[in-house]
Image: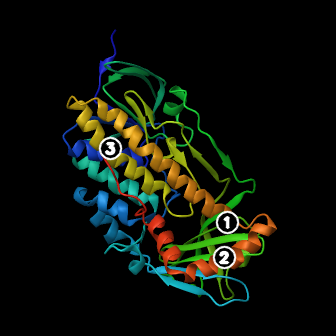
Amino acid sequence: MPPNTAPVLVAGAGPTGLAAALLLARRGVAVRIVDKALLPTRHSKALAVNPRTQELLEDTGVTARMLAEGWTVLGLTLHRPSHDDVAVPLSPLLDTHRSLVSLPQARTEALLAEALHALGVEVERGVKLDALEQGDDGVSASLVHADGSIEQVRAPLLYGADGAHSTVRQALGLAFPGDELPEPWQLWDLRLATPLDPDRVHLMLLPDGFLFVLRVHGDLWRVMGNGAHPLDALPPGTVCGEVEWQSHFHIAHRVAERAGVGRVLLGGDAAHIHSPLGARGMNLGIEDAYVFADCAADALGGHLSRLASYAQLRHPVHRRVVRRIAALTRLMHGHPAALRELRDELVPRLMHFGPARRQFFRVAGGLDHPVRTRG
């Protein structure tokens, strides 16, 4: 029996895949989105929705809902033992009327999925893309359903947004070069009673590493660090309560050797991974989705060269952003001791130096480069 004819196939229903499907559907392009997970994730790797993402999703109505649910980050405070804090406002440094908004990734995904549902497209869960083969006129893929049945489908295009261990990227035979920091990092989402300003991001330079603290909502905070006992580094007067989520992980910085081959393209973690510092992971993936939707719609309209345009446009961006985040992470994480000494001297000075401070926030805001949909 010949394979079924299918719409554009999106593998992966994280923020990148959902945004790609939504932006295609809004253009009137038939789309099918599958994800191997039976249920949406309850935990949130990303917390910040940056100004660029808000801009790209404005016309979908999702941005307004993000702003209604999230809270605006007013600034950043740098903390060092035995030193005065360095507090920096955020909005004036971004050169935009928008700011960073704190909203759990799980809610961002839910809002994207609801907007997609309103256009008649449902995420097909428990469906894993297992293999693919492409030709001049389309892509053949094997989909394994939760009951073990295998469906053969045919799609004009395939978008691989299936995460860091991407089946799509592996099927294309693309290398994922990069490196990994040796030490484990720890993460908590927990209830805190703390004197920390709830409307700011807090970065703490510690003798054995680095600590990141951000309120999620209410009295729930994200605490992440690479020291031996990160929670012990929270300021005096802090009382730790119920832990909603705890995780240990290693940080890697990698970029796929190409952002796609032929009719199969990559976005999000399938194409690039990096540390959470800089708040770019989810946001960069949604940017990928925006460019993909534009290129894919043109390709389906007869301009097939636009598929190559996507890879040519996005790959340099991926390399540039990951390189910047990797450099920032290596500086901030405080190992070895010589680098920690440099960090402790350099970072406070940079926070006081206007151009460096502005560039840091432009990176975090996704405003360090224009979003180009054409070469």
Q: Please name the amino acid that badge 3 sits on.
A: Gly
Which quadrant of the view contains residue 238? bottom right
Which quadrant of the view contains residue 257? top right
Between marks 1 and 2 in the image, the one whose residue lies nearer the viewer: 2
- From this viewpoint, is residue 30 visible? no
Is disc 2 in contact with disc 3, using a CB cutoff of under 8 Å? no
Residue 375 marker: 3
Q: How is the image coloured?
A: rainbow
Between marks 1 and 3 in the image, the one whose residue lies nearer the viewer: 3
Q: Secondary structure at mark 3?
A: loop
Question: Toward the viewer: 151 or 337?
Answer: 337
Relative placement, left or right, of 113 versus 276 is: left
The vertical placement of 56 against 295, above or below, is below
Q: What quarter of the picture does the N terminus occupy?
A: top left
Residue at the image point whose x is 57% and y is 79% from the top: 351
The vertical placement of 189 against 158, above or below, is below
Where's residue 314, x and y in %?
42, 45
For the residue carrying disc 3, how many other residues have a C-alpha within 10 Å: few (<14), some (14-19), or many (20+)? Answer: few
Name the residue carrying label 1. Answer: 331
Spatial CA span between label 1 and label 3: 34 Å
- From this viewpoint, is residue 358 visible? yes
Where's residue 311, x and y in %?
41, 38
Name the residue carrying label 2. Answer: 346
Is disc 1 in contact with disc 2, using a CB cutoff of under 8 Å? yes
Residue at the image point whose x is 51% and y is 33% from the top: 169
Q: What quarter of the picture does the C terminus occupy?
A: top left
Q: Secondary structure at mark 1?
A: helix
Spatial CA span between label 2 and label 3: 37 Å
Spatial CA span between label 1 and label 2: 9 Å
